[in-house]
Every structure is written in C-alpha cells, then in structure tokens.
Image (spheres, rainbow, N blue to C red):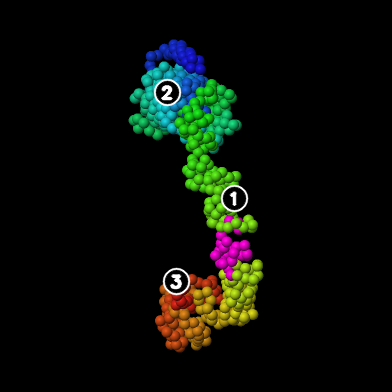
Amino acid sequence: MRTFFSSSLRFGLLTALASASTALTVAAPASAATTGFALDRFEPSERGSEWFSEDTLDLRGHLRPAAGIVGDWGYKPLVIDEADGTERQALVSDQLFAHVGAALNVWDRVRFAFDLPIALYDAGNDGSVNGQSYAAPSGAGVGDLRLAADVRLFGNYRDPITLAVGLQAWVPTGSRDNYTSDGKVRIAPHVLAAGELGGIFVWAAHVGIDYRALSTTFDGSPLGTTFGFGASAGARLIDGKLVVGPELWGCTVLENGGAFTKQATPFEAILGAHYSVGDFRVGAGFGPGLARGLGTPRVRGLLSLEWAPALRESARSDRDGDGVYDDVDACPDVKGVQTDDPKTNGCPEKDSDGDGIADAKDACPTVKGVASADPKKNGCPADRDGDGIPDDVDACPDLKGVKSDDPKINGCPPDRDGDGVPDDVDACPDVKGAKSDDPKKNGCPADRDGDGIPDDVDACPDVKGVKSAKAEFNGCPPDKDGDGIKNEEDACPDAPGPKNADPRKNGCPAAAIVSGQIKILQQVRFATASDRILPESDKILTEVAKILRDHPEITKLRVEGYTDDQGNAGYNLDLSKRRAASVVKWLTTKGGLDAKRFDSEGYGQERPIASNADEKGRQENRRVEFHIVDTGKPGAVKDK
C-alpha cells in the first residue's frame, strides 16, 4: 500500500505540476500587467471528508490514503455595480475549476494533503472601476497549489466531538490575470471540529486566519488578510453511507477597515450530499451566494468523485489485545470489554467489591456476593441478614428471622410489628395491634367501639359509626350532633341546628364553633355609617358570649370588621376598625367577659365574600367575624 500510494502521489504531483506549467504557458496574457487576485472563495476540504467545505476529521489509520477531484462552478463571482447597486458588468462571469487533490493519514493522528485547482473555464468582460481598467480572464490555467497538514488533538472519527489544528499554505502557481492567484505565498492556520450524535446528527465547523500579502484594493474595498469561518450540520442516513445537509462558509478582510463590510465579506451556502459506495464516494451540492462580497458567486454548483478507502481491519491496531481496536478503545493499554458507550468502550468493567460481578450488574456493589439470576440479588451475599435462610427464599432478607412454612413470613422476625402477637397468627403482622379471639382481628389495631373501623382511623373511636370517605367523619354516627342532618351535608356537624337552604348555614345553630371560628348565622347590625350596635343584634352577641363562657379554653379571640366597597376606602377601613372595637366593648361590658381574651381589627372593603355589584352581595360583605387565635391548650396551633 505504501509503495502504491507513494507512486500514485508522485505521479499525481508531477501530472498536476505539468498541467499547471502547460496551462500557464497557454493562458498567459499578452499584457504583463497583473491586476487580479485569487478570486474563488471555495476551498474544498481535504480528500476523505464527507463535506465539501468542512471536514469530518477522519484521520484514522497509518499510511491511509485518499484522493479525488471536486468540480466547482461559480456564476458571476466578480461583478462591477453601479452606485445604486445595480449590476453594470460581470468582470468575471464564470469560473469552472477541477480541484485535484490527495491526502495521507499517518499515526492515526496526522494528515498531509494537497489540492491543485485547475481552471477549465474562466471568462468575463473587460471593465473599469473608479478610473482603473481591469482585463477579464480568459482561457484555462491553474490556481495556487495548496499544501496542508493537520493534527488531531482529541476525539475520534464519529465521536460527539473531535478537534484538530492545522496549517495550509498556497504556492503561487496561478495567474493574477486569470484571477486564480495573488501572486504571493499565502498561509492559513486553522482550528477544525467535527462530531456525530446518535449515529444520525453530524456537524462540523472551522475558523482560521488566511494571511494574504496584498495591499491593494478593488472598487475601494481592501484586499488582504482575512478571518475565515464555516459550519455544517446534517444527517447520516442509509446505514451511514449518505451524509446530507447544508454548509455555510465565509470570511472578512481584517485590514484597512474592511472587517464585515459588504464587499470585503463574502458569504455563501450550499445544500450538499455525499454517498459512499465501497471505497468510492460521490457528492453533489448547489447553493446561493448570501452576500455581495468579492468572490461570492450568484450561485455555485459542486460535484465530486473520491477514492476514500475504508479503514482496513488489518491496518487497525489493538495494543492491549482485548478485541477492541485502538482507534475506538477508550483504554487502549488495558484489557477491557466492548460497550456501546465511547467513553467506556474497551475499558475494564469496574468491580468495587472484587466478587467478579461488575458494578453495573451488581445489586450490592460494595459487598462481596454471589451471582444470581435475579437482578435485585445478583452480586449480593447469599444470606445478608445471617439468619441461616437463603436470601432467595427469605421474605425479610435484611432482618434476622426464623423459618416458617409460610413463604410470606419465612425468615422474618417472629413478631415483626412487636405487638406481642406472633406473625404466624397475626392477621396484621406489619401493624401493631391487640390480641383477639377472632383470627381475622388478632394482632390488628383495636376497635374500642366495635364498629369495624380501627381506632387509628376512627374519627369517633368511642362511638359506633359508619365508614365515610371523609376522614373527619369516618367511624362517626351518620349524624354526630343528632339534628337530623347527615354529617356530609351539615355545615356544623358538631353543633345541632335547623335545616337551611343555604349550604353554608345548613344544620348550624345561631352561633357555633366551626373550623377555628365562632360562626354566626345572623349579622351584627350597626346604625348606618356608624359603629353603634343596633339592639336587634343583642341576641346573637349573647350567643357568642355564651359560647365563650362555655369554652374557657378559648383564651384569645380576634374580632374582625369588614365593609362593602361603597365610599372612600380609607373611611371604610376606619369604620371597620371602630365596629370591631365596638363588638369587643359589648362582649366585655354586657357579656361580662375578660377584655384580655379579645383583640380587634378592621379590614375595610378588603376580603369580600360576595360580589359588591348588587345590594345583596354588599350586605354580606358588611360583616363581623370571630376568629379563635389561641385555645390555651398545650401544643395548640395558634391562628395567624
């Protein structure tokens, strides 16, 4: 292979140089003036890539070659425009190149390559810009010979990311008259990146500096050193043989104020595809110029044919002899196993406890164990709790226990819940309970009232009741307060009261303790726009005072006043505060209660409980509420 490629490479170079010499002789213009420059902005990737301008960075193998030709046609890459931007004349109307090139990979990391553009057709019309005359190109010729070297820094072909750095250099074998050369040596260091995700999504990118020893301008736009960039993204399809997707590339002149100006910033794109058939690869692409920079064609078409031999198994090394080739072995110097993860492929399986079972499959990775067909026990000790009962038949493998003919309790402690009832006769072996002559209840939680509902979920454990979906009524009589209204429909289930069409008042007495409040059915009435309590409210306030006398554990009650939204908000707030204070005064003077048991607060028109759009709603919002703040019981939760 080495002899074949060396001969092929020498033959290709000699042929290319001979063609270049002949073309130069044929195409040399009569005038000695050299006014042109290297116009074509398409720089093909090195042979072996599956993109046109970007690089897939397949640097695998030692003395692994690739060679091919890329056809490149650009339409109107150099146009002279009028002041208003309309086209006046195409100085270069067509450029058709055949890029002949080859590459050689060495040491699985380094690539040397060359590319020689041959101008098969180069035409246009003479013209002038700003008083300077320019001759159009004509005839065939060659462009500048490009030599390159790249070094892979990390990653491998088709890894999520591979990074390389390199250098390109152009030998001035082309002609300035034909716009195929600057007439000077050019060099371009660059950084290349490529990757693949999920076996489908592929991408590549590059950035670099192209040093061009030009100090001239064209149409007032500077020529010289540029910053180049490009990127591609697409999909790998048909068993990896087809790569398709868009590519974008461009550059901008870094000198004399040219950076990112229109003419000094060519930019274009193509949609391309490459398909591999054995050791050969064909490609096609087409796309528009995206800017009016010098060298950007209106459209560009590309065709390619390459000989890119696949990496032969015989050429792949396996230093550690584990059957995983070094180019895809994450641990090439240590024997390992093959995995689908590029980060662990070829690496030894980790076995923290040294029991011969890899951590990834070991259910007990830090404790030596034995192999088991059960993934939950594989690699775990045969008897974790040491009770003499193998784990695979031990119902309690982490608790020492005793043998039993019942597989549900075999290996479990004789009394798991510690209630004094042996598990083999405990109807509720995991819940503490009490002894019972009834085998169905033996060892189960007590049921003091005998209603079939265990005390721990019985809201009325000392009174027979019925089951209820609501925890607060479960195990209670269907009508706790005996007022003839079912608990679920009773707004005051613990205080008897009459039926009421309003669900909020149904079954409630005039006043009752409900959900941390003393609820009243009748509003406290005040004189209009006043804090004077009307005599008709004495009855309901007397009921509130009675509840407080009957429940001395209520050590703090907050009286809250509210208004509707009619009138000034500040006035309403003040009125609500005075009304709440007036109620406290009634309860301490006429009710005979200790003033220390009360706080008062007013909230004005805040917190409405009904709409203020009609009189009925406004009347509901003009209210007084009694909130229990502290019951005085140890551990009681205070209201906030």
In the image, which residues are magenta?
Answer: 408-434
Q: Residues within 10 Å of mark 2 (few under 14, many from 20)?
A: some
Q: Which residue is mark 1?
A: 392
Q: Are marks 3 and 1 in contact (CB under 8 Å)?
A: no
Q: Secondary structure at mark 3?
A: loop
Query: For the residues carrying marks 3 and 2, which lies nearer the camera in this image?
Result: 3
Query: For the residues carrying marks 3 and 1, which lies nearer the camera in this image?
Result: 1
Query: In terms of depth relative to the viewer, which is nearer, 216 or 100?
Result: 100
Q: Which sits earlier in the primary sequence, circle 3 or circle 2?
A: 2
Q: Tell me the quarter of the picture where residue 408 sits.
A: bottom right
Q: Which residue is mark 2?
A: 148
- Give coordinates of residue 455: x percent, y percent: 58, 71
Could you tell me what secondary structure mostly forms the magenta stretch?
loop
Q: Amino acid at mark 1?
A: Asp
Separation of marks 3 and 1 at Cα, in angstroms: 55 Å
419 drawn magenta: yes
Separation of marks 3 and 2 at Cα, in angstroms: 78 Å
Horizontally, residue 381 falls left or right of residue 584, namely right
- Residue 640, label in figure: 3
Q: In this rendering, is residue 358 above or below 251?
A: below
